[in-house]
Amino acid sequence: MASNSDQQSMDVNYIARLARMNLDALEARQFQTQMDGIVDYVRQLSELDVEGVEPTAHAAPIQNVFREDLAQPGLTQEQALANAPAQSGGQFIVPKIVE
């Protein structure tokens, strides 16, 4: 991070190195301009008076809609193995994979 007189600026080249990204000079200038704009916007937000405002995760109330968890019948062993390309002793036979 580089610091200016009264504000801090995030160094895009440093962030790119951390992310193992290779940026050319044009990309670095473009991303630096964008990053500075984001940091300035966040700085503006931090100056807002939010006294008495309750923290929220969403602007509108959201709730999960769950279905009732009911046990339902599954496949029989014969049904599960009906389309198996290979089976033996009531089990699927799969190719051995060793890396």
Image: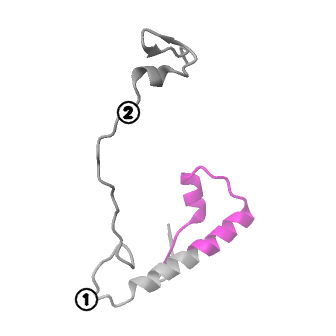
Q: Position of residue 92 (x, y in %)?
A: 48, 17
Residue 87, x across and y down, in percent: 50, 13
| Magenta residues, dominant SS class | helix
State the SS at label 2.
loop
Which residue, given by chain and number where applicable, does mark 2 sit on?
74
Q: Quadrant of the C terminus?
A: top right
Q: Which mark is residue 36?
A: none
Name which residue lies at 51% across and 76% down.
39
First reached walking from the N terminus: tag 1 or tag 2: 1
Instruction: Residue at 27%, 89% (x, y): give it.
Output: 51
- Amino acid at circle 1: Gly
Numbered disc total: 2
Tag shown at residue 52: 1
Q: Is residue 56 left or right of residue 20?
A: left
Residue 23, how many percent across, how many down? 68, 57
Residue 67, above or below 45: above
Looking at the rendered structure, the kind of residue marked 2 is Gly
Choose mark 1 or mark 2, whichever is in front. 2
Q: How is the image coloured?
A: one colour
At a point 59% along the width and 49% down the height, the residue shown is 20
Residue 86 in view: yes
How dense is the environment of label 2, judged by Cα within 10 Å: few (below 14), some, or many (20 and up)?
few
Q: Against 66, is 71 above or below?
A: above
At 55% from the left and 22% from the top, the residue drawn is 83
Image location of residue 25, percent across then percent down: 72, 63
- What stretch of residues is rendered in magenta? 8-35
Front residue of 82/50: it is 82
Rendering quarter of residue 11 = bottom right
Q: Around disc 1, counting alpha carbons within 10 Å, would you say few (fewer than 14), some (14 to 19), or many (20 or more)?
A: few
CB atoms of marks 1 and 2 within 8 Å: no
Front residue of 9/61: it is 61
